[in-house]
Image: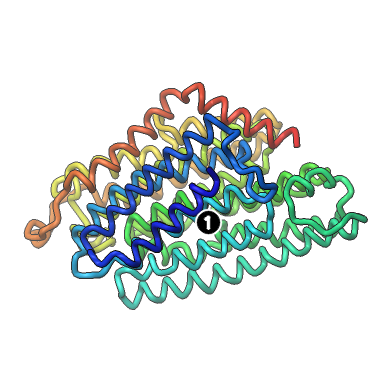
Amino acid sequence: MALLLIFFPLGMALLAIVIPSNHLRPWLLPVTGIVHTFGTVVVILHPELGSQSALLILDPVGIIVLIAITLLFLVASFYTVGYLHYRKERSNRIFSASLLAFLGLISLVIWSHDLGLMWVAMEGTTLVTAPLIYFNHTKKSIEATWKYLLVGSVGIALALLGTFFLAYSSMQGGFKATLLFDELLNIAPGLSKIWLKASFILLLIGYGTKMGLAPMHTWKPDAYGEAPGVVGAVFAGGVTSGAFLALLRIYQICDAAGETLFTANLLKAIGLFSMVIAGIFLIGQRDIKRMLAYSSVEHMGILALGLGIGAPALYGTLLHIITNALTKGVLFLSAGNIHRAYESKSTDQVKGVLRSLPFTGVLFLLGFFAITGSPPFGPFISEFAILNGAFAAGNFGIGAIFLLLLLLVFIGMSTTVFKTLQGRTPLHIKEKEYTDNFLTIAPIVVCLILVLFLGLHVPEPLKNLLNDAAAYMENR
Protein backbone atom coordinates (compact mmCIF):
# COMPACT_ATOMS: atom_id res chain seq x y z
CA MET A 1 0.00 0.00 0.00
CA ALA A 2 2.94 2.32 0.67
CA LEU A 3 4.07 1.85 -2.92
CA LEU A 4 0.56 2.68 -4.18
CA LEU A 5 0.34 5.93 -2.19
CA ILE A 6 3.84 6.99 -3.25
CA PHE A 7 4.27 5.74 -6.80
CA PHE A 8 0.73 6.05 -8.14
CA PRO A 9 0.80 9.90 -7.94
CA LEU A 10 4.33 9.90 -9.41
CA GLY A 11 3.16 7.70 -12.27
CA MET A 12 0.21 9.97 -12.89
CA ALA A 13 2.62 12.93 -12.95
CA LEU A 14 4.49 11.26 -15.80
CA LEU A 15 1.17 10.59 -17.53
CA ALA A 16 0.26 14.27 -17.17
CA ILE A 17 3.41 15.20 -19.06
CA VAL A 18 2.57 12.80 -21.87
CA ILE A 19 -1.15 13.60 -22.32
CA PRO A 20 -1.50 16.28 -25.03
CA SER A 21 -4.97 17.57 -24.11
CA ASN A 22 -4.98 20.71 -21.99
CA HIS A 23 -8.65 20.02 -21.22
CA LEU A 24 -8.38 16.37 -20.12
CA ARG A 25 -5.08 16.59 -18.25
CA PRO A 26 -6.43 18.32 -15.07
CA TRP A 27 -8.86 15.43 -14.50
CA LEU A 28 -5.87 13.28 -13.56
CA LEU A 29 -5.77 15.25 -10.31
CA PRO A 30 -9.17 14.23 -8.87
CA VAL A 31 -8.66 10.66 -10.09
CA THR A 32 -5.38 10.51 -8.21
CA GLY A 33 -6.92 12.24 -5.19
CA ILE A 34 -9.70 9.65 -5.01
CA VAL A 35 -7.28 6.71 -5.31
CA HIS A 36 -4.94 8.23 -2.71
CA THR A 37 -7.77 8.87 -0.25
CA PHE A 38 -9.13 5.36 -0.76
CA GLY A 39 -5.67 3.89 -0.20
CA THR A 40 -5.27 5.97 2.96
CA VAL A 41 -8.56 4.67 4.37
CA VAL A 42 -7.61 1.08 3.54
CA VAL A 43 -4.19 1.27 5.17
CA ILE A 44 -5.66 2.87 8.31
CA LEU A 45 -8.31 0.15 8.61
CA HIS A 46 -5.89 -2.63 7.68
CA PRO A 47 -2.41 -1.74 9.03
CA GLU A 48 -1.13 -5.16 7.97
CA LEU A 49 -1.27 -3.95 4.37
CA GLY A 50 1.40 -1.38 5.09
CA SER A 51 5.03 -1.71 4.05
CA GLN A 52 7.14 -4.47 5.61
CA SER A 53 10.33 -2.48 5.04
CA ALA A 54 12.17 -0.79 7.90
CA LEU A 55 12.54 2.24 5.63
CA LEU A 56 8.82 2.78 5.03
CA ILE A 57 6.53 2.61 8.07
CA LEU A 58 3.25 4.42 8.64
CA ASP A 59 3.24 5.10 12.37
CA PRO A 60 0.38 6.71 14.36
CA VAL A 61 1.81 10.23 13.95
CA GLY A 62 2.26 9.74 10.21
CA ILE A 63 -1.38 8.67 9.93
CA ILE A 64 -2.55 12.06 11.23
CA VAL A 65 -0.46 13.98 8.72
CA LEU A 66 -1.50 11.62 5.92
CA ILE A 67 -5.19 12.22 6.72
CA ALA A 68 -4.72 15.99 6.60
CA ILE A 69 -2.84 15.96 3.31
CA THR A 70 -4.98 13.43 1.45
CA LEU A 71 -8.22 15.25 2.36
CA LEU A 72 -6.78 18.62 1.38
CA PHE A 73 -5.42 17.31 -1.91
CA LEU A 74 -8.71 15.59 -2.76
CA VAL A 75 -10.65 18.82 -2.30
CA ALA A 76 -8.03 20.94 -4.05
CA SER A 77 -7.87 18.54 -7.01
CA PHE A 78 -11.51 19.10 -7.94
CA TYR A 79 -11.11 22.85 -7.46
CA THR A 80 -8.07 22.82 -9.76
CA VAL A 81 -10.16 21.45 -12.62
CA GLY A 82 -12.54 24.40 -12.27
CA TYR A 83 -9.68 26.86 -11.86
CA LEU A 84 -7.79 25.69 -14.94
CA HIS A 85 -11.00 26.04 -16.97
CA TYR A 86 -10.43 29.80 -16.67
CA ARG A 87 -6.75 29.52 -17.55
CA LYS A 88 -7.04 28.12 -21.06
CA GLU A 89 -4.51 30.67 -22.31
CA ARG A 90 -1.70 28.76 -20.58
CA SER A 91 -0.57 25.14 -20.74
CA ASN A 92 -1.26 23.25 -17.52
CA ARG A 93 1.15 20.39 -18.28
CA ILE A 94 3.83 21.35 -15.74
CA PHE A 95 1.25 22.63 -13.27
CA SER A 96 -0.70 19.35 -13.19
CA ALA A 97 2.43 17.18 -13.18
CA SER A 98 3.96 19.19 -10.33
CA LEU A 99 0.88 18.85 -8.14
CA LEU A 100 0.76 15.10 -8.72
CA ALA A 101 4.48 14.69 -8.07
CA PHE A 102 4.10 16.67 -4.86
CA LEU A 103 1.48 14.22 -3.56
CA GLY A 104 3.78 11.27 -4.22
CA LEU A 105 6.80 12.90 -2.60
CA ILE A 106 4.98 14.19 0.47
CA SER A 107 3.60 10.66 0.91
CA LEU A 108 7.20 9.43 0.87
CA VAL A 109 8.05 12.00 3.57
CA ILE A 110 5.22 10.63 5.71
CA TRP A 111 6.17 6.97 5.27
CA SER A 112 9.95 7.42 5.59
CA HIS A 113 11.49 5.99 8.75
CA ASP A 114 14.96 6.61 7.42
CA LEU A 115 15.72 10.26 8.16
CA GLY A 116 18.04 10.48 5.18
CA LEU A 117 15.32 9.26 2.83
CA MET A 118 12.90 11.66 4.47
CA TRP A 119 15.30 14.52 3.74
CA VAL A 120 15.57 13.49 0.09
CA ALA A 121 11.77 13.39 -0.22
CA MET A 122 11.41 16.79 1.45
CA GLU A 123 13.96 18.30 -0.93
CA GLY A 124 11.99 16.71 -3.76
CA THR A 125 8.86 18.57 -2.68
CA THR A 126 10.81 21.82 -2.94
CA LEU A 127 11.84 21.12 -6.52
CA VAL A 128 8.42 20.01 -7.78
CA THR A 129 6.46 22.81 -6.09
CA ALA A 130 8.68 25.65 -7.32
CA PRO A 131 7.14 25.67 -10.86
CA LEU A 132 3.69 26.06 -9.27
CA ILE A 133 4.62 29.49 -7.95
CA TYR A 134 5.65 30.66 -11.44
CA PHE A 135 2.40 29.60 -13.12
CA ASN A 136 1.22 33.19 -13.71
CA HIS A 137 4.51 34.05 -15.51
CA THR A 138 4.89 37.54 -14.05
CA LYS A 139 8.01 39.34 -12.85
CA LYS A 140 6.81 39.05 -9.26
CA SER A 141 6.09 35.34 -9.61
CA ILE A 142 9.57 34.56 -10.95
CA GLU A 143 11.08 36.61 -8.13
CA ALA A 144 8.94 34.70 -5.60
CA THR A 145 10.01 31.39 -7.15
CA TRP A 146 13.71 32.20 -6.89
CA LYS A 147 13.29 33.42 -3.31
CA TYR A 148 11.48 30.18 -2.44
CA LEU A 149 14.24 28.09 -4.02
CA LEU A 150 17.05 30.13 -2.47
CA VAL A 151 15.70 30.32 1.07
CA GLY A 152 14.35 26.78 0.92
CA SER A 153 17.66 25.43 -0.33
CA VAL A 154 19.57 27.08 2.51
CA GLY A 155 17.07 25.66 4.99
CA ILE A 156 17.16 22.16 3.55
CA ALA A 157 20.99 22.28 3.45
CA LEU A 158 21.03 23.05 7.17
CA ALA A 159 18.59 20.18 7.69
CA LEU A 160 21.01 17.88 5.85
CA LEU A 161 23.85 19.02 8.08
CA GLY A 162 21.64 18.42 11.12
CA THR A 163 20.85 14.94 9.82
CA PHE A 164 24.58 14.20 9.54
CA PHE A 165 25.09 15.48 13.09
CA LEU A 166 22.36 13.13 14.27
CA ALA A 167 24.10 10.14 12.73
CA TYR A 168 27.41 11.34 14.20
CA SER A 169 25.84 11.58 17.66
CA SER A 170 25.20 7.83 17.49
CA MET A 171 28.84 7.21 16.55
CA GLN A 172 30.04 9.41 19.42
CA GLY A 173 27.79 7.41 21.73
CA GLY A 174 29.55 4.20 20.76
CA PHE A 175 26.94 2.92 18.32
CA LYS A 176 27.08 2.37 14.60
CA ALA A 177 26.05 5.37 12.51
CA THR A 178 22.37 5.11 11.67
CA LEU A 179 19.54 7.28 10.41
CA LEU A 180 16.78 4.73 10.97
CA PHE A 181 14.20 6.39 13.18
CA ASP A 182 13.37 3.32 15.29
CA GLU A 183 17.03 2.52 15.90
CA LEU A 184 17.73 6.10 16.95
CA LEU A 185 14.81 5.97 19.39
CA ASN A 186 16.12 2.75 20.93
CA ILE A 187 19.65 4.08 21.45
CA ALA A 188 18.57 7.67 22.22
CA PRO A 189 19.73 7.66 25.89
CA GLY A 190 23.25 6.81 24.74
CA LEU A 191 23.55 9.43 21.99
CA SER A 192 26.15 12.18 22.35
CA LYS A 193 24.20 15.03 23.93
CA ILE A 194 26.31 17.82 22.42
CA TRP A 195 25.95 16.52 18.88
CA LEU A 196 22.26 15.73 19.44
CA LYS A 197 21.55 19.29 20.58
CA ALA A 198 23.47 20.71 17.63
CA SER A 199 21.47 18.42 15.35
CA PHE A 200 18.17 19.59 16.79
CA ILE A 201 19.06 23.27 16.35
CA LEU A 202 20.03 22.76 12.71
CA LEU A 203 16.96 20.62 11.98
CA LEU A 204 14.71 23.14 13.71
CA ILE A 205 16.09 25.89 11.48
CA GLY A 206 16.10 23.69 8.37
CA TYR A 207 12.65 22.18 8.59
CA GLY A 208 11.40 25.33 10.31
CA THR A 209 12.27 27.14 7.08
CA LYS A 210 10.02 24.75 5.16
CA MET A 211 7.28 25.30 7.74
CA GLY A 212 7.70 29.06 7.55
CA LEU A 213 8.53 29.65 11.21
CA ALA A 214 9.83 33.14 11.93
CA PRO A 215 12.43 34.39 11.24
CA MET A 216 12.89 31.79 8.46
CA HIS A 217 9.53 32.72 6.91
CA THR A 218 10.76 35.34 4.45
CA TRP A 219 9.90 33.26 1.36
CA LYS A 220 6.31 32.76 2.43
CA PRO A 221 4.59 36.13 1.77
CA ASP A 222 6.01 36.34 -1.75
CA ALA A 223 5.39 32.70 -2.67
CA TYR A 224 1.86 32.60 -1.29
CA GLY A 225 1.13 36.03 -2.69
CA GLU A 226 2.11 35.26 -6.28
CA ALA A 227 1.05 31.63 -6.60
CA PRO A 228 -2.50 30.59 -7.58
CA GLY A 229 -4.84 30.10 -4.64
CA VAL A 230 -4.83 26.32 -4.91
CA VAL A 231 -1.03 26.33 -4.69
CA GLY A 232 -1.22 28.41 -1.52
CA ALA A 233 -3.55 25.81 -0.05
CA VAL A 234 -1.11 23.01 -0.94
CA PHE A 235 1.78 24.92 0.64
CA ALA A 236 -0.06 26.02 3.79
CA GLY A 237 -1.70 22.68 4.49
CA GLY A 238 0.60 20.19 2.75
CA VAL A 239 4.24 21.25 2.56
CA THR A 240 4.16 22.74 6.05
CA SER A 241 2.51 19.65 7.56
CA GLY A 242 5.19 17.41 6.04
CA ALA A 243 7.94 19.64 7.41
CA PHE A 244 6.33 19.63 10.85
CA LEU A 245 6.27 15.83 10.78
CA ALA A 246 10.02 15.88 10.14
CA LEU A 247 10.39 18.13 13.17
CA LEU A 248 8.25 15.74 15.22
CA ARG A 249 10.69 12.93 14.42
CA ILE A 250 13.74 14.69 15.83
CA TYR A 251 11.68 15.92 18.79
CA GLN A 252 10.81 12.31 19.66
CA ILE A 253 14.47 11.31 19.52
CA CYS A 254 15.52 14.20 21.76
CA ASP A 255 12.67 13.42 24.15
CA ALA A 256 13.77 9.78 24.36
CA ALA A 257 17.33 10.99 25.00
CA GLY A 258 16.20 13.03 28.01
CA GLU A 259 16.64 16.43 26.33
CA THR A 260 12.97 17.42 26.57
CA LEU A 261 13.60 20.67 28.44
CA PHE A 262 16.16 21.86 25.88
CA THR A 263 13.92 21.21 22.90
CA ALA A 264 10.78 22.47 24.65
CA ASN A 265 12.29 25.86 25.45
CA LEU A 266 13.45 26.37 21.86
CA LEU A 267 10.09 25.30 20.43
CA LYS A 268 8.09 27.53 22.76
CA ALA A 269 10.33 30.49 22.03
CA ILE A 270 10.21 30.14 18.24
CA GLY A 271 6.48 29.37 18.36
CA LEU A 272 5.61 32.54 20.26
CA PHE A 273 8.04 34.59 18.17
CA SER A 274 6.34 33.38 14.97
CA MET A 275 2.96 34.40 16.35
CA VAL A 276 4.30 37.83 17.30
CA ILE A 277 5.79 38.43 13.84
CA ALA A 278 2.58 37.26 12.18
CA GLY A 279 0.46 39.52 14.36
CA ILE A 280 2.62 42.57 13.63
CA PHE A 281 2.58 42.10 9.86
CA LEU A 282 -1.14 41.38 9.79
CA ILE A 283 -1.90 44.83 11.15
CA GLY A 284 -2.76 47.03 8.17
CA GLN A 285 -2.07 44.28 5.62
CA ARG A 286 -3.61 45.20 2.26
CA ASP A 287 -2.77 42.08 0.24
CA ILE A 288 -5.23 39.27 1.00
CA LYS A 289 -2.86 36.48 -0.06
CA ARG A 290 0.04 37.89 1.95
CA MET A 291 -2.41 38.13 4.85
CA LEU A 292 -3.01 34.39 4.52
CA ALA A 293 0.75 33.82 4.35
CA TYR A 294 1.25 35.54 7.70
CA SER A 295 -1.71 33.57 9.06
CA SER A 296 0.22 30.44 8.07
CA VAL A 297 3.28 31.75 9.93
CA GLU A 298 1.05 32.17 12.98
CA HIS A 299 -0.33 28.64 12.80
CA MET A 300 3.08 27.08 12.30
CA GLY A 301 4.01 28.95 15.48
CA ILE A 302 0.99 27.42 17.21
CA LEU A 303 2.13 23.94 16.17
CA ALA A 304 5.66 24.59 17.44
CA LEU A 305 4.28 26.01 20.69
CA GLY A 306 2.00 23.03 21.22
CA LEU A 307 4.87 20.63 20.64
CA GLY A 308 7.05 22.62 23.05
CA ILE A 309 4.40 22.45 25.78
CA GLY A 310 4.61 18.69 25.54
CA ALA A 311 2.35 15.82 26.55
CA PRO A 312 -0.66 17.82 27.82
CA ALA A 313 -0.92 19.65 24.47
CA LEU A 314 -0.03 16.85 22.05
CA TYR A 315 -3.63 15.88 21.30
CA GLY A 316 -4.52 19.47 20.41
CA THR A 317 -1.32 19.91 18.39
CA LEU A 318 -1.98 16.82 16.30
CA LEU A 319 -5.62 17.80 15.79
CA HIS A 320 -4.46 21.27 14.72
CA ILE A 321 -2.50 19.74 11.84
CA ILE A 322 -5.83 18.62 10.35
CA THR A 323 -7.97 21.64 11.24
CA ASN A 324 -5.35 24.11 10.01
CA ALA A 325 -4.89 22.27 6.69
CA LEU A 326 -8.62 22.13 5.95
CA THR A 327 -9.26 25.73 7.00
CA LYS A 328 -6.38 26.95 4.86
CA GLY A 329 -8.10 25.12 2.01
CA VAL A 330 -11.23 27.21 2.56
CA LEU A 331 -9.32 30.49 2.69
CA PHE A 332 -6.82 30.02 -0.12
CA LEU A 333 -9.34 28.58 -2.56
CA SER A 334 -11.74 31.42 -1.79
CA ALA A 335 -8.91 33.92 -2.23
CA GLY A 336 -8.16 32.28 -5.57
CA ASN A 337 -11.72 32.99 -6.73
CA ILE A 338 -11.45 36.60 -5.59
CA HIS A 339 -8.12 37.09 -7.35
CA ARG A 340 -9.47 35.60 -10.57
CA ALA A 341 -12.52 37.89 -10.57
CA TYR A 342 -10.76 41.13 -9.56
CA GLU A 343 -7.33 40.44 -11.07
CA SER A 344 -5.98 42.00 -7.91
CA LYS A 345 -5.18 40.99 -4.33
CA SER A 346 -5.09 44.48 -2.85
CA THR A 347 -7.86 45.87 -0.71
CA ASP A 348 -7.46 49.10 -2.70
CA GLN A 349 -9.12 47.35 -5.65
CA VAL A 350 -10.85 44.37 -4.05
CA LYS A 351 -14.08 45.60 -2.49
CA GLY A 352 -17.67 44.44 -2.34
CA VAL A 353 -16.88 40.74 -2.68
CA LEU A 354 -20.12 39.83 -0.91
CA ARG A 355 -21.98 41.57 -3.72
CA SER A 356 -19.96 40.43 -6.71
CA LEU A 357 -19.15 36.87 -5.53
CA PRO A 358 -21.72 36.10 -2.83
CA PHE A 359 -20.85 32.41 -2.38
CA THR A 360 -17.12 33.00 -2.33
CA GLY A 361 -17.55 36.01 -0.06
CA VAL A 362 -19.52 34.07 2.54
CA LEU A 363 -17.05 31.17 2.45
CA PHE A 364 -14.11 33.56 2.82
CA LEU A 365 -15.80 35.22 5.81
CA LEU A 366 -16.53 31.90 7.51
CA GLY A 367 -12.98 30.74 6.77
CA PHE A 368 -11.68 33.87 8.49
CA PHE A 369 -13.70 33.15 11.62
CA ALA A 370 -12.53 29.54 11.57
CA ILE A 371 -8.81 30.26 11.17
CA THR A 372 -8.85 32.86 13.97
CA GLY A 373 -10.11 30.23 16.42
CA SER A 374 -13.74 31.26 16.62
CA PRO A 375 -16.30 28.65 17.70
CA PRO A 376 -17.85 26.41 16.50
CA PHE A 377 -15.08 25.59 14.00
CA GLY A 378 -12.32 23.00 14.23
CA PRO A 379 -9.37 25.33 14.95
CA PHE A 380 -11.19 26.56 18.06
CA ILE A 381 -11.19 23.02 19.45
CA SER A 382 -7.55 22.33 18.62
CA GLU A 383 -6.32 25.71 19.89
CA PHE A 384 -8.40 25.39 23.05
CA ALA A 385 -6.85 21.95 23.64
CA ILE A 386 -3.37 23.48 23.27
CA LEU A 387 -4.31 26.28 25.69
CA ASN A 388 -5.62 23.73 28.20
CA GLY A 389 -2.38 21.84 27.76
CA ALA A 390 -0.37 24.97 28.56
CA PHE A 391 -2.33 25.54 31.76
CA ALA A 392 -2.14 21.84 32.71
CA ALA A 393 1.65 22.00 32.30
CA GLY A 394 1.79 25.07 34.54
CA ASN A 395 2.72 27.43 31.69
CA PHE A 396 0.24 30.12 32.72
CA GLY A 397 2.33 32.97 31.35
CA ILE A 398 2.65 31.28 27.98
CA GLY A 399 -1.09 30.59 27.97
CA ALA A 400 -1.84 34.27 28.62
CA ILE A 401 0.55 35.42 25.88
CA PHE A 402 -0.99 32.86 23.53
CA LEU A 403 -4.46 34.34 24.10
CA LEU A 404 -3.22 37.91 23.58
CA LEU A 405 -1.52 36.98 20.32
CA LEU A 406 -4.66 35.24 19.08
CA LEU A 407 -6.54 38.46 19.75
CA LEU A 408 -3.89 40.50 17.92
CA VAL A 409 -4.15 38.23 14.88
CA PHE A 410 -7.96 38.41 14.92
CA ILE A 411 -7.87 42.21 14.93
CA GLY A 412 -5.25 42.36 12.17
CA MET A 413 -7.00 39.92 9.87
CA SER A 414 -10.47 41.34 10.45
CA THR A 415 -9.46 44.75 9.12
CA THR A 416 -8.29 43.27 5.82
CA VAL A 417 -11.14 40.77 5.49
CA PHE A 418 -13.94 43.23 6.08
CA LYS A 419 -12.41 45.80 3.74
CA THR A 420 -12.45 43.11 1.08
CA LEU A 421 -15.98 41.91 1.67
CA GLN A 422 -17.78 45.19 2.25
CA GLY A 423 -18.30 48.25 0.09
CA ARG A 424 -19.43 48.73 -3.48
CA THR A 425 -18.23 46.51 -6.25
CA PRO A 426 -16.05 48.42 -8.77
CA LEU A 427 -17.87 48.88 -12.08
CA HIS A 428 -15.24 47.11 -14.19
CA ILE A 429 -15.61 43.92 -12.11
CA LYS A 430 -19.21 43.47 -13.27
CA GLU A 431 -17.96 43.08 -16.82
CA LYS A 432 -15.49 40.29 -16.05
CA GLU A 433 -16.22 36.79 -17.31
CA TYR A 434 -15.44 35.09 -14.00
CA THR A 435 -18.37 33.95 -11.82
CA ASP A 436 -18.69 31.36 -9.09
CA ASN A 437 -19.36 27.89 -10.49
CA PHE A 438 -19.81 24.41 -9.09
CA LEU A 439 -16.19 23.25 -9.32
CA THR A 440 -14.82 26.43 -7.76
CA ILE A 441 -17.37 26.52 -4.94
CA ALA A 442 -18.32 22.93 -4.05
CA PRO A 443 -14.78 21.89 -2.96
CA ILE A 444 -14.59 24.92 -0.64
CA VAL A 445 -17.99 24.05 0.82
CA VAL A 446 -16.82 20.49 1.48
CA CYS A 447 -13.71 21.82 3.24
CA LEU A 448 -15.80 24.17 5.36
CA ILE A 449 -18.25 21.41 6.30
CA LEU A 450 -15.34 19.28 7.50
CA VAL A 451 -13.93 22.19 9.53
CA LEU A 452 -17.35 22.86 11.06
CA PHE A 453 -17.93 19.18 11.77
CA LEU A 454 -14.59 18.89 13.61
CA GLY A 455 -15.60 21.90 15.68
CA LEU A 456 -18.92 20.37 16.68
CA HIS A 457 -17.76 16.78 17.18
CA VAL A 458 -14.50 14.93 16.71
CA PRO A 459 -15.53 11.46 15.47
CA GLU A 460 -14.59 8.60 17.77
CA PRO A 461 -12.35 6.86 15.17
CA LEU A 462 -10.38 10.09 14.61
CA LYS A 463 -10.24 10.73 18.35
CA ASN A 464 -8.76 7.27 18.83
CA LEU A 465 -6.17 7.91 16.12
CA LEU A 466 -5.21 11.20 17.76
CA ASN A 467 -4.91 9.58 21.18
CA ASP A 468 -2.84 6.75 19.70
CA ALA A 469 -0.52 9.27 18.04
CA ALA A 470 -0.14 11.28 21.25
CA ALA A 471 0.56 8.09 23.24
CA TYR A 472 3.07 6.97 20.59
CA MET A 473 4.98 10.22 21.04
CA GLU A 474 4.89 10.04 24.83
CA ASN A 475 5.87 6.40 25.22
CA ARG A 476 8.70 6.08 22.70
Quadrant occupied by the C terminus: top right
Q: Which residue is nearer to you in this view: 160 or 4?
A: 4
Kindly tell me whether residue 268 is visible in this rendering: no
Count of marks overlaid on the render: 1
Q: Which residue is nearer to you in this view: 423 or 125?
A: 125
Q: Which residue shows up at 42% across the image and 65% down it?
A: 223
Does residue 90 appear to the left or right of 94 in the view shown? Answer: left
Q: Which residue shows up at 24% across the image and 41% down it?
A: 442
Where residue 244 sits: x, y (%)? 58, 50
**At numbered mark 1, what does the secondary structure look like: helix, strand or loop?**
helix
Packing grade of label 1 (10 A; few <14, some 14-19, many >=20) is some
**Hey, what amino acid is under mark 1?**
Ile
The residue identified by callout 1 is 277
Q: Which residue is nearer to you in this view: 251 or 278?
A: 251
Kindly tell me whether residue 93 is visible in this rendering: yes
Does residue 439 appear to the left or right of 251 in the view shown? Answer: left
Where residue 445 sits: x, y (%)? 28, 38
